[in-house]
Image (spheres, rainbow, N blue to C red):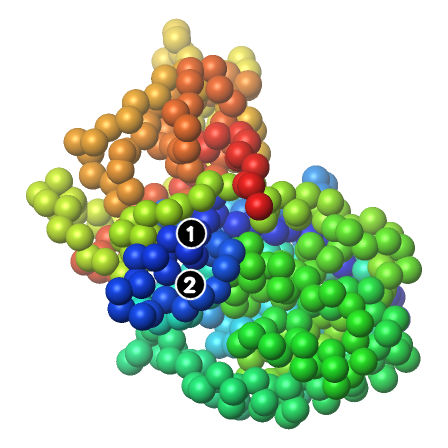
């Protein structure tokens, strides 16, 4: 059987990071909020589990790689019935004939998909993307403990990180749950969770995986074990003999518990510092456990950049803005917010793949435009002409003009828009996102896949690309 390996990884967090101390200070009068230090990642109004997964997936796949299967893993899909993996394929401009799969219902859905891909010895390369933006209620400690983010893994043949051994266990532990009737989480008592998760699920599964791999616990260089409650890894390490640091703890401290994306994000960080020959233990937890023992055999694309995801961003200390961004506070935005944003299914059918992929057109004279049109916009051209597809999503643009507008409605004002110039010649009027310090004309911007509009009346959302500053500021510890 052909040996498959982890060839690429991608880790992505939203720009904003809530300082948990600021939230605790705002909630001090109530005695709620908890005392966790660190920060949690906060998605912008135009980010959801899909957009976070897309951004991570863009980082995991090397140019020219051929992907045969795409898997999207999340417990917080914005749609109950619309394939997120299918939209992801369009966003990455992968072939339409690709095989897609949506998995969810468990926080270990990402690691379960990874294990299946590694065991599929004869299959084509697989891209697994995980993203989470889980709803929570103010006052619930999980609102500060959890975070928003995405992670992705590219599996194929060749060097990278190979599977030495594994084990799985199904166990319906109701530590936390959300449902259609109760979409925000309800958590059981912490000591019950910790004692049961450690003794009945994690320890036996990890021991079985180490035995299958023929690896002693002390040989593990880095562990990635998500902690549903504090103290789980300490108890697991004591019971199994693990001496390695837990990369999942760093993710929780810097960005929060990322649900289905959490173990894959920790894997990205672990591979970023690993050396050839290192052995890693990866555990997915939720409704049971998957435990994978991996060995690093060569460089992994994207791993070296994973650390940037947790070390760059912007601190958010405004608790009211945080509540608004998380949907916990329903502000009255006035008449300007009363927009009718119904999306036509027929228009989406006709132009949706070009919109999601940000595909423009180039005419025979080399002029590039977006959107494509039957008659090119080049001066002097008055007849229809064929156009070559040009993907603009991966290009760096330059700001030609930018306006901060407080008259147009935005859920996170002000609304920024302006002209962006691309190197191939295309010039577009675009929305901007992730604006921190005021950008200037001439600054470089990258393209981010984001929510374009939300039809709250009918529960539908559309996606498109927005311009964001090229670099993020480094966070101070």
Q: Quadrant of the N terminus?
A: bottom right
Q: Position of residue 393 (x, y in %)?
A: 52, 35
Q: Is residue 100 visible?
A: no
User: What residue occupies the far top of the structure in this picture?
Assistant: 380
Q: Earlier in the sequence, mark 2 or mark 1?
A: 1
Identified at 88% across, 78% down, the residue is: 216
Instruction: State left or right for residue 9 relative to residue 467.
Output: right
Question: How many angstroms separate mark 2 from mark 1 (CA)?
Answer: 8 Å
Q: Which mark is residue 144?
A: 2
Identified at 60% across, 68% down, the residue is: 110
Q: Is residue 157 above or below residue 352?
A: below
Circle 1 residues within 10 Å: few <14, some 14–19, many ≥20: many
Q: Is residue 438 above or below residue 152?
A: above
Q: Position of residue 458 (x, y in %)?
A: 22, 60
Determine the secondary structure under disc 2: helix
Q: Residue 374's quadrant in the figure?
A: top left
Residue under label 1: 18
Q: Is residue 287 above or below residue 371?
A: below
Q: Is residue 14 above or below residue 426?
A: below
Identified at 38% across, 53% down, the residue is: 22
Q: Is residue 204 visible?
A: yes
Taking depth in this image into account, of 349 and 358 the one nearest to the observer is: 358
Determine the secondary structure under disc 1: strand
Q: Position of residue 454 (x, y in %)?
A: 28, 51
Q: Are marks 2 and 1 in contact (CB under 8 Å)?
A: yes
């Amino acid at each position: 059987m052909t040996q498959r390996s982890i060839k690429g990884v991608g880790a992505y967090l939203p720009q904003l990071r809530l300082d948990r101390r600021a939230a605790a200070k705002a909630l001090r009068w109530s005695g709620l909020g908890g005392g966790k230090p660190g920060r949690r990642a906060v998605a912008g109004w135009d980010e959801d589990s899909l957009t976070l997964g897309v951004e991570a997936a863009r980082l995991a796949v090397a140019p020219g790689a051929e992907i045969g299967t795409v898997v999207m893993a999340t417990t917080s899909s914005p749609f109950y019935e619309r394939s997120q993996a299918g939209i992801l394929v369009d966003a990455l401009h992968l072939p339409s004939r690709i095989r897609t799969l949506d998995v969810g219902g468990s926080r270990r859905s990402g690691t379960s998909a990874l294990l299946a891909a590694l065991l599929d010895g004869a299959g084509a390369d697989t891209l697994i993307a995980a993203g989470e933006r889980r709803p929570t209620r103010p006052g619930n400690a999980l609102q500060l403990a959890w975070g928003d983010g995405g992670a992705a893994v590219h599996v194929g043949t060749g060097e990278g990180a190979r599977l030495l051994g594994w084990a799985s266990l199904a166990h319906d532990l109701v530590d936390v749950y959300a449902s259609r009737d109760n979409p925000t989480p309800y958590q059981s008592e912490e000591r019950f969770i910790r004692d049961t998760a450690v003794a009945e699920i994690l320890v036996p599964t990890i021991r079985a995986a180490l035995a299958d791999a023929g690896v002693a616990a002390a040989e593990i260089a880095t562990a990635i074990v998500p902690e549903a409650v504090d103290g789980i890894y300490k108890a697991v390490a004591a019971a199994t003999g693990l001496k390695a640091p837990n990369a999942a703890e760093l993710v929780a401290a810097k960005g929060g518990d990322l649900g289905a994306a959490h173990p894959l994000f920790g894997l990205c960080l672990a591979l970023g510092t690993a050396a050839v020959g290192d052995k890693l233990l990866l555990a997915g937890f939720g409704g049971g456990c998957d435990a994978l023992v991996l060995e690093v055999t060569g460089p992994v694309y994207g791993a070296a950049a994973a650390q940037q995801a947790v070390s760059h961003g912007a601190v958010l200390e405004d608790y009211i803005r945080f509540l608004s961004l998380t949907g916990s506070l329903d502000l009255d935005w006035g008449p300007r917010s009363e927009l009718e944003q119904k999306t036509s299914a027929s228009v989406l059918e006709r132009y949706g793949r070009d919109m999601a992929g940000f595909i423009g057109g180039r005419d025979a004279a080399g002029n590039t435009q977006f959107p494509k049109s039957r008659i090119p916009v080049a001066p002097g051209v008055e007849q229809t002409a064929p156009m070559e597809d040009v993907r603009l999503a991966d290009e760096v643009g330059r700001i030609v003009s930018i306006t901060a507008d407080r008259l147009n409605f935005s859920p996170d004002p002000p609304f920024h828009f302006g002209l962006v110039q691309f190197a191939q010649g295309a010039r577009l009027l675009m929305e901007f996102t992730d604006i921190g310090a005021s950008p200037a004309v001439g600054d470089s911007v990258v393209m981010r896949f984001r929510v374009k509009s939300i039809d709250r009346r009918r529960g539908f959302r559309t996606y498109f690309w927005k311009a964001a500053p090229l670099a993020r500021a480094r966070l101070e510890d």
